[in-house]
Image (cartoon, helix red, strand yellow):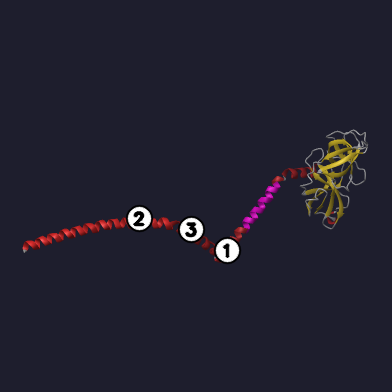
Amino acid sequence: MAYRRKKKNNTNVVITSIILVIVIILSSHLQQVVKAGSNITNTIFKPLNELTYSISSTIMEQIEMTVGSKQTRKEVERLKAENQTLLQDNAKLKTTINRKDFLKAENDAINNSKNSYIKAKVINTDVNSMQESFHINKGLDDGIKVNDVIVQAIGDSDYYTAVVGKVIEVNKNTSKIETIKSSTNDVAFVNSNSGDYGVIDYFKNKVINGYMLDIDSIVEQGDILLTSGLGGVYPQGLYIGTVGNISMSQDSLRKNITVNSPVDFTHLYRVLVLQEEGGKDE
């Protein structure tokens, strides 16, 4: 009996040992399975978690902007206004830099020319008709009169300015200008090289056209054209431009020319009103 009890006890020990070994093995594999499952879960849900976090952060940011403290909102608005001001100042600075050559030419014309001028800014302009007429911010209160001559600084040391047009209408603080490109503004000129006279009579296809009064007059490309003084509006000796193309009319009764003006009529922003003419600029 004692032998049987001993044998049974040994058997129980063996069985218990085997069970323990099995439990240990299963436990180890179970941890690996749990770990693997966790990795799979993270792989599947990580992008979703990131998206959720991003959306929630954005929402919280907007909520903070909307319902944040009064001090925070006030600071944000101040920074926005300050940024807008800086952008405007930067744009103005760029514009000034782009116009530095014109500003220098204008300064030279005012300080070195024998003529006296009033500076005027171009306003209320229809871009489509600007080449033929525009308005300036000077009028009766500034001493502007009908038929006052309008010129623009060109940066030429011989002729500091070139003719733009004349005043045709004056109001209290503004005036209307008609340019030499207008079909109603015939401008008489003289060829400074030959002394022959001509007239600017119309504007077509972005070209100023004119003709010589004498069909036998001598005229060549590049000849300098000045106001002749005929007609009593434009004083003698103001610079208009140079001769471009020369051609005869189909009936051979008129010698036509084109005029190259140094004035950019499509980008006028400031002009000079001639107040006192002192002769040809030198």
Mark 2 or mark 3: which comes first in sequence?
A: 2
What type is the residue that disc 1 sits on? Arg
Q: Residues within 10 Å of mark 1 (few under 14, many from 20)?
A: some
Tag in front: 2 or 3: 2
CA gap, disc 1 and disc 2:
49 Å
Indicate the position of residue 281 as horizontal and vertical percent values. Answer: 84, 40
Q: Main secondary structure of the magenta part?
A: helix
Q: Earlier in the sequence, mark 3 or mark 1?
A: 3
Q: Could you say which disc has been placed on residue 73 in the image? A: 1
Q: Is residue 231 above or below residue 55?
A: above
Q: Which mark is residue 36?
A: 2
Q: Which residue is mark 3?
A: 51
Q: Quadrant of residue 172?
A: bottom right
Q: Along the line of sight, which residue is nearer the eye, 112 or 175?
A: 175
Left or right of 12 on screen, residue 65:
right
Give the residue displayed 32% in from the left and 55% down from the top: 32
Specify the amino acid type for callout 3. Leu
Range of the magenta residues?
A: 81-96
Q: Residue 138 at x, y = what percent?
A: 82, 54
Specify few, some or many for label 2: CA neighbours under 10 Å numbering under 14, 14-19, or 20 or more.
few
Counting residues from the N terminus, which is met first, the one under dot 1 or under dot 2? 2
Q: Secondary structure at mark 3?
A: helix
Q: Is residue 281 visible?
A: no
Label pair 3/1, CB-CB below 8 angstroms:
no
- Label 3 crowd (10 A; few <14 / some 14-19 / many >=20): few
Q: Nearer the viewer, residue 50 or 123?
A: 50
